Amino acid sequence: MSLRFYDTRARTVRDFTPLHEGRVSLYLCGATVQAPPHIGHIRSGVNFDILRRWLTYKGFRVTLCRNVTDIDDKIINVARAEGVPWWEVSERNQRAFTWAYDTLGCLPPTVEPRATGHVPEMVELMARLIDRGHAYAAADGSGDVYFDVRSFPEYGELSNQRLDQMRGAADTDDERGKRDPRDFALWKGARPGEPSWPTPWGAGRPGWHLECSAMATKYLGATFDIHGGGLDLVFPHHENETAQSRAAGDGFARYWLHNGLLTMGGEKMSKSLGNSLLIPEMVRKVRPVELRYYLGQAHYRSVIDYSDDALLEAAAAYQRIEGFLVRAGEVVGEVAPAAEVPAEFAAALDDDLGVSSALAVVHGHVREGNSALAEGRKERAADLAGQLRAMLSVLGLDPLSEQWAGTDDAAGLRDVVDALVSVALEQRQAARARKDYAAADLIRDRLGAAGIVVEDTPHGPRWELRRS
């Protein structure tokens, strides 16, 4: 099967052919940093990290540009409420996003531009639009610059909407010289107490949509392969991006991929609803790799409705995968990832990044691997473990990888704990041998109280730390 993706603009699954052979350019709408991230924000990062890893496995050289919107109405409002500079709010929350991406195993982007570092490119793009008759400076001298939506006949094509049925753009507090309420702001004229930059049309700051078009084309070119982001961004953000970029003469994105929302009780997860689940809180409930599994397990276009039960079920599913690999390592020794993933796993990811189908292949290998270990078929268990590690590597979930295996200090601590637990297990085995089952059970219970789970196997007792 060829590589295929659901393209939002085409509203169908299309074969993927990159603009340049062997290379893929990918722009991902990143954070607007008015607050630290919740799991709804980071789901997008995980989904597109899996996409990037799969493209890399397929042999493509991937350039990922993930922007940071570090100036915005919401950022200014937070700063005003806290009595701090706007850049202080942006800086601390960008660090929180970076930590969250790193904690959940997302590879760093090739480039991560900030909006405030690309004002010259935005000014140049506005000039092109004005020269072509697609944008205008407000006649009231406010410094506002607007995109004329009626000048671009394809406006509404991405979101499948008709212009005559659209409401006015809610991106300014008042009309301030708009010719049409549906025209959207490219540039917002300076207001007292707000940051501003000079332009030929007056001082001000960029509009949200203008930022992404300027940054995407600077780093990926006038035409690039894939634009990604959350489904909630299709309109107005992505509609406005593609309109202004194409109106300026750029080809812009050839494929549009959107991940589904993460909801809670059927509502979109957001700070305004008070149902945000921040990443530091979540990684106290489950390990980061288990949270990544939860966020990445469903098809990227599907909606996930969060619940603690679903999170813990996902953690348990991941622990079954991890448990087999640990047991296999104890029986057959260290197993390296296979050179290739199984064909059925590859077919699942080639078909619009079908992670849920790919995970069915993963769990099938785990079940067969456990049977092989129980039956003493070491060679087959080793083969399955190698294939499993290859698949998990593509998904960013390999528990034996450097990302998740822990630091050298943690590994050394486990060696110490293993030595101490081994002494207790030897005493338990001696008690069982002399039929002193009460003493054997007491040792097991005391280990359990300390968070150590003992499992009796055909190869002798083994232990692991109890998971949440």
Image: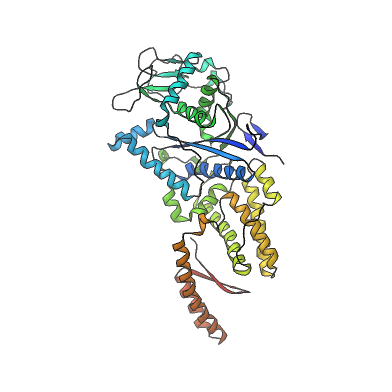
Q: Which residue lies at the image location 43% right of the left edge and 43% below the top edge?
A: 97
Quadrant the N terminus occupies: top right
Q: Which residue lies at the image location 69% right of the left edge and 45% below the top edge?
A: 347
In the image, farthest residue toward the left = 83
**Residue 113 position in % (x across, y down):** 45, 35
Q: Is residue 398 above or below residue 354?
A: below
Q: Nearer the viewer, residue 114 or 422?
A: 114
In the image, farthest residue toward the bottom = 434
Q: How is the image coloured?
A: rainbow
**Residue 447 position in % (x across, y down):** 47, 73
Instruction: Report whether residue 265 is seen.
Output: no
Q: Is residue 387 above or below residue 1?
A: below
Q: Quadrant of residue 203?
A: top left
Q: Quadrant of residue 349?
A: top right
Q: Quadrant of residue 449?
A: bottom left
Instruction: Report whether residue 145 is seen.
Output: yes
**Residue 29 position in % (x across, y down):** 50, 35
**Count of numbered circles in the view:** 0
**Residue 196 position in % (x across, y down):** 34, 25
Q: Nearer the viewer, residue 301 or 321?
A: 321
